[in-house]
Image (cartoon, helix red, strand yellow):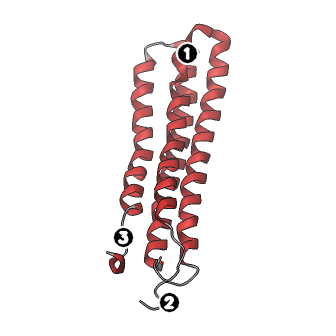
């Protein structure tokens, strides 16, 4: 294998995949937590007994960051410097970048959805308790967006270069 196939800068793309997985999924989790938290605070003024029941959106938003952490750890374990024994190709770098972006951006989208639904859901639940089940179902569908990115990120993150098999 020549150095053209495994240039010295190839691991940069893998590291950017790690960073993308963690940064974007944490941004989504932070937004979901903050947005849901403001809804809980507003709802708690009227119905303080519902605070613990309304904490579900915050928990679900936090799980999105765990998805990014899992993929970032997988990718970090597969990144190697180019030397005499190891060849980290551009293929590896681009696949790892795609894995990180997949889980990171889907986590960002899931966090936004969880935040919006969590905020409106807990506020509405204070006025009409029967909204709780509907809110949970919508939150599950929002969370699964991040899960799809996790699955694709794991599949891509464990893919080996055709020349390294």
Mark 2, Cα crowd under 10 Å, few <14 / some 14-19 / many 20+, is few
Q: Quadrant of residue 45?
A: top right
Q: Quadrant of the N terminus?
A: bottom left
Question: Where residue 6 appears, x then y in whole percent?
Answer: 49, 83
The mark found on residue 3 in the picture is 2
Q: Quadrant of residue 157?
A: bottom left
From the viewer's side, name the closer residue of 145 and 82: 82
- In the picture shown, does residue 12 fall above or below 76? below
The residue drawn where x is 36% and y is 66% is 159
Instruction: Identify the secondary structure beneath mark 1.
Output: loop
Question: Where residue 140 appears, x then y in whole percent?
Answer: 40, 34
Mark 3, Cα crowd under 10 Å, few <14 / some 14-19 / many 20+, is some
The residue drawn where x is 40% and y is 21% is 133
In the rendered picture of this protein, how many numbered marks are placed on residues? Answer: 3
Q: Earlier in the sequence, mark 3 or mark 2?
A: 2
Instruction: Identify the secondary structure beneath mark 3.
Output: loop
Label 3, label 2: how far apart the Cα atoms are: 18 Å
Mark 1, Cα crowd under 10 Å, few <14 / some 14-19 / many 20+, is few
Q: Which residue was labeled with disc 1? A: 52
From the viewer's side, name the closer residue of 161 and 100: 161
The mark found on residue 94 in the picture is none
Q: Earlier in the sequence, mark 1 or mark 3?
A: 1
The residue drawn where x is 39% and y is 55% is 154
Q: Which residue was labeled with disc 3? A: 160
For discs 2 and 1, the disc positioned in front in the rendered view? 2
């Amino acid at each position: 294998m020549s150095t053209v196939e495994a240039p010295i800068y190839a691991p940069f793309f893998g590291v950017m995949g790690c960073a993308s997985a963690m940064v974007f999924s944490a941004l989504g989790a932070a937004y979901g937590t903050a947005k849901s938290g403001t809804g809980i605070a507003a709802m708690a003024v009227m119905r303080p007994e519902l605070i613990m029941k309304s904490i579900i959106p915050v928990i679900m938003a936090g799980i999105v960051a765990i998805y990014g952490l899992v993929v970032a750890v997988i990718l970090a374990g597969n990144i190697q410097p180019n030397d005499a024994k190891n060849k980290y190709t551009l293929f590896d770098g681009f696949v790892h970048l795609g894995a990180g972006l997949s889980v990171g951006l889907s986590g960002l989208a899931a966090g936004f959805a969880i935040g919006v639904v969590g905020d409106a859901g807990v506020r509405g639940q204070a006025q009409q308790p029967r909204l709780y089940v509907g809110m949970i179902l919508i939150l599950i569908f929002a969370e699964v967006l991040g899960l799809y990115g996790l699955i694709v990120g794991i599949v891509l993150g464990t893919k080996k270069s055709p020349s390294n098999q």
